Image (cartoon, coloured by chain):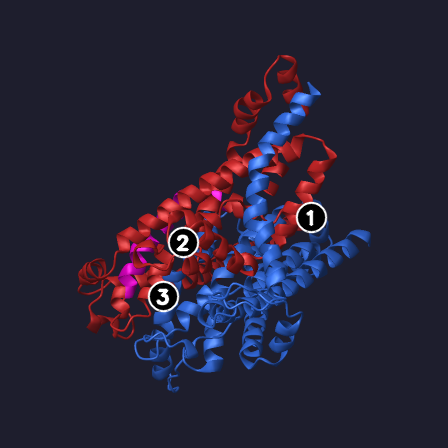
Chain colours: A blue, B red
């Protein structure tokens, strides 16, 4: 009987484990291994070169630009999304019983679920230097039009706006779950004590939702560090000139691997990306545990 | 006694009206924010029906003065758009099926069977969940190449066969919503393990699997980096990759791009509105890590 159950568990798990080993564990291991090797795709041998790839990364201006841009984008999206999502979720939660609640939830969430490329196309039009409504608005207000998608600083800003627009819905939904789980008795007590709604938001909701803020922040940062499609679509002009793209980590990685045939070097960039994500995750767990202890 | 009573009622009234004013103000703010959020998409769909002259109009019109389907006709003639959509649907459906199957069985075993070694498996699955796909997609590309499945649905599928979060979600659901007694009773009645899984466990997981299915479908549907490197022939593009590469072409104007985008957006927004409950539930469950 016990033996039969054990056999069933083993047989049922086997396919998933095999797939997992093949499409997750092996390539992750391969990334780590390749990062210490030099490989140009074409040649059969992949000489071991230790940490030479990483040493080269430190001095690589393109990689540094990519890392800087990606970091700015990730933190930019975080700074816009988290406060806005918290306030919006509080307002939507306050109006839960309103007939419009479903509309609010759907409208804010739709940008998160629509396909990325078509949605980015809408923003490409908005930011377009000649046809875009943004420049038309600026001109009619008496300002000089700007070439949003070509300017190296402004184009990063455009990517941040697009990413925030998409990330907001996710953060709001998660915050709404958080608001629904807060103890109502605490709020009733605070109300009896004469605390106003903004006071209750600031002194009760914000601290109580800290674990959720932490979680959403890490998810937002991690997906910010993996940004690629948004930059690809927004900042490639009609001629697709690669030099004009907003250089982000994933772009630099793919370029090194498939355009420059330097797979080992690209793998070392992937390892840097992994290290960033791991650090963020460790910080999240540390802070959560601290909260649990206090 | 009397004035006091009057006093409280009038104060109650004023408090009530004050609350209503605040609620209306909140509704106005939220409606404005919501309209702002969907405005880019509204304009995208509207631009798809505009003539090149009207695209330039300021302020932009929401309902085109002179609606035309020329953009749609041009884009369907220029690109195998329907084929790309077909590729995306096939890829997304297969990915969803694989993820549902692997998550259901694995989540059930990890949630209900108590062997020490299972904890190790679960720890490995959770640990790999932290690693972003972008980190290992280049080695995975070379695996697909070695298998000879580049530029095919199978190649796309290789990256989207399993979902760590799906296994985690089903495991949580199994632990919380399927009582041990139920399974034990079935075993005492002589039911086989496979029968128990198919006839008792799966039906009870319908809600969770629905939410996961929607999540998995949209994950594949919106995939970008992986399809971009794996599908490099025009016929094998997914809709996301096809559109993204189409827009870098020399002769493409925004009217056509909007038409192509609208063709993709309208069905996916419709699907979302229909499945909104499942969706919100699925996404919300990603936040419930404890």
- Residue A230 visible? The answer is yes
Question: Front-most of A261 and B78?
Answer: A261
Residue found at x 22% / y 57%: B76
Which mark is first along the chain, 3 or 1? 3
Residue B278: x %, y % from top left: 48, 41
Circle 2 is placed at which residue position? B150
Same-chain status of marks 2 and 3: no
Numbered tag placed on residue A188 in the rendering = 1
Question: Badge 1: few (under 14), some or many (20 or more) residues near its Cα, within 10 Å?
Answer: few
CA gap between label 1 and label 3 equals 47 Å
Q: Residue furthest top?
A: B189
Q: To which chain does the residue with label 1 belong?
A: A
Residue A108: x %, y % from top left: 47, 56
On screen, residue B100 above or below B256: above
Numbered circles on residues, count: 3
- Residue A82 visible? The answer is no
Question: Front-most of A107 and A204?
Answer: A107
- In the image, is A40 to the left or to the right of A200? left
Residue B190: x %, y % from top left: 61, 13
Magenta-colored stretch includes residue A247: no
CA gap between label 1 and label 2 equals 60 Å
Query: Marks 1 and 2: which is nearer the front?
Result: 2
Q: To which chain does the residue with label 3 belong?
A: A
Magenta-colored stretch includes residue B268: yes
Numbered tag placed on residue A121 in the rendering = 3
On screen, residue B34 above or below B2: below
Range shown magenta: B257-279
Residue found at x 31% / y 65%: B246
Question: Front-most of B286 and A139?
Answer: B286
Residue found at x 36% / y 66%: A121
Residue A103: x %, y % from top left: 43, 51
């Amino acid at each position: 009987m016990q033996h039969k159950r054990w056999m069933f568990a083993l047989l049922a798990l086997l396919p998933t484990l095999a797939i997992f080993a093949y499409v997750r564990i092996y390539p992750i291991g391969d990334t780590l291994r390749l990062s210490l090797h030099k490989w140009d795709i074409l040649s059969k041998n992949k000489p071991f070169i230790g940490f030479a790839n990483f040493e080269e990364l430190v001095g690589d201006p393109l990689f540094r630009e990519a890392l800087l841009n990606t970091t700015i984008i990730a933190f930019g999206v975080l700074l816009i999304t988290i406060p806005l999502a918290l306030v919006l979720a509080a307002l939507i939660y306050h109006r839960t019983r309103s007939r419009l609640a479903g509309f609010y939830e759907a409208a804010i969430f739709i940008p998160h679920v629509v396909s990325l490329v078509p949605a980015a196309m809408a923003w490409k039009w908005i930011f377009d230097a000649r046809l875009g409504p943004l420049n038309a608005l600026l001109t009619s207000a008496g300002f000089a039009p700007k070439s949003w998608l070509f300017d190296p600083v402004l184009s990063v800003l455009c990517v941040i706006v697009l990413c925030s627009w998409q990330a907001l819905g996710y953060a709001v939904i998660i915050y709404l779950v958080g608001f629904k789980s807060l103890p109502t008795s605490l709020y009733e007590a605070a109300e009896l004590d004469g605390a106003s709604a903004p006071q209750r938001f600031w002194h009760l909701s914000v601290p109580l939702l800290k674990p959720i803020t932490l979680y959403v922040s890490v998810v937002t940062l991690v997906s910010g560090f993996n940004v690629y499609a948004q930059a690809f679509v927004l900042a490639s002009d009609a001629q697709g000139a690669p030099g004009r793209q907003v250089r982000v980590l994933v772009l630099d990685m793919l370029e090194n691997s498939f355009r420059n045939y330097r797979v080992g070097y690209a793998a070392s960039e992937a390892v840097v990306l992994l290290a960033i994500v791991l650090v963020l995750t460790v910080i999240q767990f540390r802070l959560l545990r601290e909260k649990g202890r206090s | 006694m009397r004035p006091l009573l009057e006093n409280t009622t009038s104060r109650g009234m004023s408090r009530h009206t004050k609350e209503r004013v605040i609620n209306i103000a909140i509704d106005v703010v939220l409606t404005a924010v919501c309209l702002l959020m969907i405005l880019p998409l509204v304009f995208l769909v509207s631009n798809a029906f505009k003539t090149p002259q009207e695209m330039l109009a300021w302020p932009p019109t929401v309902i085109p003065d002179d609606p035309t389907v020329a953009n749609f006709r041009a884009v369907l003639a220029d690109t195998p758009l329907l084929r790309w959509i077909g590729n995306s649907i096939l890829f997304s459906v297969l990915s969803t099926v694989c993820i549902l199957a692997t998550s259901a069985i694995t989540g059930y075993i990890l949630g209900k069977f108590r062997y020490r070694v299972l904890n190790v498996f679960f720890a490995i699955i959770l640990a790999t969940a932290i690693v972003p796909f972008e980190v290992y997609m280049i080695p995975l590309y070379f695996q697909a190449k070695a298998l000879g499945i580049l530029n095919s649905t199978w190649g796309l599928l290789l990256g989207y066969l399993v979902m760590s979060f799906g296994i985690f979600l089903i495991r949580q659901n199994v632990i919380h919503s399927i009582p041990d007694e139920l399974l034990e009773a079935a075993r005492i009645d002589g039911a086989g393990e496979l029968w128990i899984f198919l006839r008792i466990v799966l039906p009870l997981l319908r809600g969770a699997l629905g939410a996961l299915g929607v999540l998995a479908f949209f994950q594949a549907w919106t995939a970008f980096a992986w399809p971009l490197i794996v599908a490099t022939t025009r016929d094998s593009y997914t809709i996301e990759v096809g559109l993204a590469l189409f827009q870098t072409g020399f002769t493409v104007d925004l009217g056509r791009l909007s038409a192509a985008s609208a063709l993709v957006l309208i069905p996916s927004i419709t699907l979302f509105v229909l499945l909104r409950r499942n969706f919100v539930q699925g996404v919300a469950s990603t936040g419930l890590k404890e």
